[in-house]
Image (cartoon, rainbow, N blue to C red):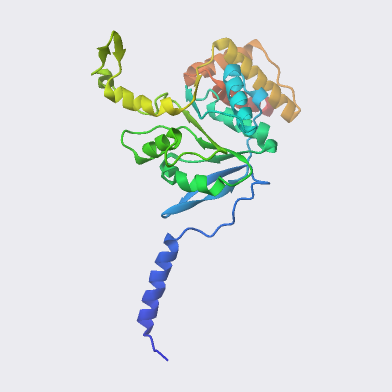
Amino acid sequence: MINIKPEVVAQLERVLGSVEMLLPRATKPVDWTTCHAANWRRHSFSGYLEPVKVTDTTRLDELLGVDEQKKIMVNNTRQFLQGLPANNALLWGSRGTGKSSIVKALLNEYGDQGLRVIQVEKEDLIYISEIFAAIEDQPYRYIMLCDDLTFETGELSYKMLKSALDGSVYSAPENVLIYVTSNRRYLLPEYDGDHLGGKYVKGELQQSEIQEEKSSLSDRFGLWVPFHVFSQDRYLEAVKLCLERWSKQLQREVPWSKDVEQAAIKWSHDKSKRCGRTAFQFSKNWVGKYLVK
């Protein structure tokens, strides 16, 4: 029998403990029959899919002022669910105008038809091949969502996403589409000097090499879906709808009046933004103050 000194045993235990911390966490596979959404959770050198309980109940008909955007995304997603050709999509534009809400509403609308969503943070795009491997044999249709995405020049995750969209080694399997939301159309910061170096070729102005590179990622999305700030009338319509829904949910009437309209306009001026998010935030504030009296 070999006698091992206690200090050696203690040292081995410390080493094994350190190694165990680096290993991927032992987790059960996601049960996609009951789970409609998941996050990729990074751990050490790899990661795992973590089930997410969907608590956002937003429906498509609740989203105001984005009818054209909804139509584009609904058509594309329905094509995808039916196994027909469909495009990866870049939803870009002003903050708070419903980009993320549309994707959540699509899940609520089509989850029963086999749609699933996996949200991936920018830093975790380096694991994109592992994410694809985990779901490519599943009988469901997945949207890989990168929410509020922007890059800095030279980031590795930028190149990984570019490769996945380009159909290279990291290309998405047949049952995965990539939807990205961003405030930037080109996903990269733009500088004044980016446009320097453009030249005319046979009478047409060609972009500079810097601008070509910066637009190359967004060009790989088949759909560009723009979102813009609301007009005042559209913003007030959103406020009215929010008040109606709060009244229905709380079963206590919150009437519309000139005072509400003026307060809603002032709120949008204070926030420097007319959008669905501003309308929703105002409605919560107004309804709460009105009913507490």
Residue 45 visible, this angle: yes
Q: Specify whether 44 is left or right of 132.
A: left
48 in relation to 241, above or below? below
Rendering coords of residue 47 (x, y %): 47, 52
Q: Residue furthest bottom?
A: 1
Quarter holding the C terminus is top right
Q: Position of residue 239 (x, y in %)?
A: 62, 19
| Residue at point 40%, 39% (across, down) | 160
* Quadrant in which residue 82 is drawn: top right
- Residue farthest toward the front in the current orientation of the protein: 202
Residue 190 visible, this orientation: no
Residue 6 x %, y %: 38, 83
Q: If the image is split into quadrants, where does the N terminus sit?
A: bottom left
Residue farthest right in this picture: 251
Determine which quarter of the picture holds residue 112: top right
Task: From this view, report whether residue 30 is shown above or below residue 83.
Answer: below
Of residues 163 and 279, the one drawn nearer to the viewer in this rendering? 163
Residue pictured at 35% horizontal, 80% vertical: 8
Front-most of residues 189 and 253: 189
Numbered disc total:
0
